[in-house]
Amino acid sequence: MKPDVTGELIARGRAAMREFASASQERLDEAVTALAWSLYKPDNARAFAELAVEVTGLGDVASKIIKNQRKTFGTLRDLMRVKSTGIIEELPEKGLVKYAKPVGVVAAVTPATNPSATPVNKAMMAIKGGNAVIIAPSPLAWSATSATVEAMRAELSKIAAPRDLVQILPQPVTRESTAQLMGAADLVVVTGSQNNVRRAYSSGKPAIGVGAGNVPVIIDASADLDDAAEKICASKIFDNSTSCSSENSLIIVDEIYESALAALVRAGGYLASEEEGRAIVEVLWREGKLNRDIIARDAAVLAQAFGLGGDAKSAKFFMVEETGIGPDHPLSDEKLSLVLTLYRAKDFTQAKRIGAEILDHLGKGHSIGIHTQNMHHARELAEEIDVVRVLVNQAHTFGNGGGFDNGLPFTLSMGCGTWQGNSITDNLNYRCFLNITHLVTTIPEDKPGENELFGGYWEKYGK
């Protein structure tokens, strides 16, 4: 990409921001709604889902339609309920008034797995704060993301808002062109490749990156097994397991192991024999890396590729038993496929340990789930495991990025905290795209006496 192309994109983004600088909250919300409608519109949701699968070969159309609409609708719900310009908070008791202002032109790096939903999701959050956004898509997904960006731009034109609030890097998208955009933007937000996340942190600009997922989920002795199995199945098979929030390992306590397996089989799972498990590993990994020809494929395609017959041909997902964790045990990794690793734990204490070891190997900070009726066990996970999210009795893929029945904000980008080298321990949300000015006025003096602050220490240790 020629050096002046990035400069031109940035200049057009800044010009669009200036044109939109006086936008009221109502006007900003109208623009956000326009972006949402560009993807939520049923014809578009289907067309972009079909294009995504056609272009990338990843996932399935039905799931992507749901994702395009559900994530967009949920994000719109969240954004319509908050203020993002002018005074957004007043704290008279502290003498503080907070004003929201744009962060500037945002470079938004998006993955091949979500070539429409993620760009729209990020654009909605950015424009909510009055920013402009330039999408840097996966090269594999450029044509799908480009069509999505054009739809957003067309919808902005419909409401007489600047089209250049949303732009896309032109082809060919390369490591160099993406890095150039990162270095020129005011804020970099990366979802997808951990290589891109590291490059964003090295760009010299403020950057928000998210971590890799490798979700372990515990099935506890008190779990409703059929409910757990149905939720795990629905979550695992969604979009052929392309989500970073998809279950990758199940840790089942010994007391209910066989019953849980039976429930998982009833839900559509196929339990591979030891020999079949070895064949699955040999096909799924090539030279230590996931086989690009196999990941995110339909179950029937996998059954054939794995050489599985009989009941496997009608299965929705495949289960392989494992005992090891780490580099020599690839099944303990994220699989991006309809393959689920099973671990057997003698009790909940061991299940916790296995979950922590899996995350320490890959996915630390991201999330863990549990199916249980014992909330004490759920709280133990929250207290002891280094993760941002602990989901209880939920289909992980549908709950981790925000749900209508939990309080997490809707997003397609999950921060993992310093545990995975990220700057946020939250779901990416609109506040990540705001600068805040604090108006500070005096209040009655709030200065305690020395004894109030040091008295306990002096009493215990002396002066």
Image (spheres, rainbow, N blue to C red):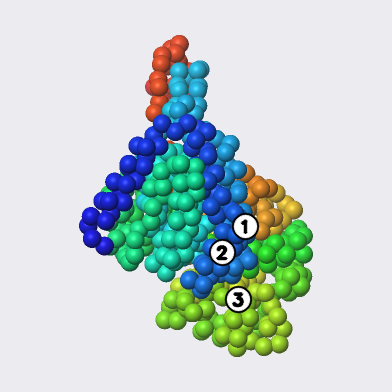
Does dot 2 land on a helix, a strand or a loop? helix
Q: Position of residue 213 (x, y in %)?
A: 51, 61
Position of residue 396 in the picture relative to residue 90 (left or right): right
Residue 279: image quadrant is bottom right
Residue 457, compared with residue 446, is above or below; it is below
Residue 176, compared with residue 32, is above or below; it is below
At x 55%, y 49%, the residue is 36
Amino acid bearing label 2? Ala
Q: Position of residue 335 (x, y in %)?
A: 53, 71
Indicate which disc, 3 or 1, sits on the residue closer to the N terminus.
1
Amino acid bearing label 3? Asp
Q: For the view shown, which residue lies furthest in the top direction?
A: 444
Q: Position of residue 286 (x, y in %)?
A: 45, 81
Neighbours of disc 3 within 10 Å: few (<14), some (14-19), many (20+): many
Q: Quadrant of the N terminus?
A: bottom left
Does dot 1 land on a helix, a strand or a loop? helix
Amino acid bearing label 1? Pro
